[in-house]
Image (spheres, helix red, strand yellow):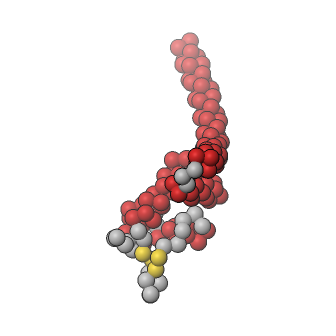
Amino acid sequence: MSLYKIDDVAKECGLTKRTIRYYEEIGVMPSPQRTDGGTRLYTREDIDYLKKVVRAKEVLGFSLQELHTYVATADALNEQRFDYQQTTEVIERIEKLTKMETTLDDQLQLIEQKLQSIHAVQEELEELRERVQNGIRRLEGLENDT
């Protein structure tokens, strides 16, 4: 298993070392293993996890609080998936899947709220653009009259 230092992780994820440390500090990302000297060592799984966090922040525009919620929900889903795989009884499996469905619904609701905010901003910009276009047409009409 390959281990990576924070410099390598920062370059690969497009973050600063300080941001990575901060994400660990506030619980958005789990703390990696460390050497005896305290140097952080990241696994490929740590890097993939961090990339998922970065994608949620950049693509969805999540705040740090929303990121924390998103990550906690994703972690819960992973635990639930593991629990499901350990169960063989049909009734228990149905219960586990129902719990996973609820967790997924929570995550989808968070994304839906973000999409609604994005659409509201989009509508405001489209209305502003329409007013600007109307202003241009009105002024062009005045110019043609002279």
Is 132 rendered above or below residue 144? below
Label tally: 0
Spot occupied by residue 11 in the image (x, y as percentages of width and height): 38, 64
Query: In the image, what residue occupies the spot 37% across and 72% down?
Result: 3
Q: In which quarter of the image is the N terminus?
A: bottom left
Q: In which quarter of the image is residue 10?
A: bottom left
Query: In the image, what residue occupies the spot 56% across and 24% down?
Result: 133
Spot occupied by residue 123 in the image (x, y as percentages of width and height): 62, 31
Is 108 rendered above or below residue 11? above
Q: In which quarter of the image is residue 118?
A: top right
- Residue extending furthest left? 2
Query: In the image, what residue occupies the spot 48% across and 73% down?
Result: 32
Q: Nearer the viewer, residue 103 or 36?
A: 103
Q: Quadrant of the C terminus?
A: top right
**Does 7 sit left or right of 118 as displayed?**
left
Query: In the image, what residue occupies the spot 37% across and 69% down?
Result: 8
Spot occupied by residue 140 in the image (x, y as percentages of width and height): 54, 19
Spot occupied by residue 29 in the image (x, y as percentages of width and height): 54, 65
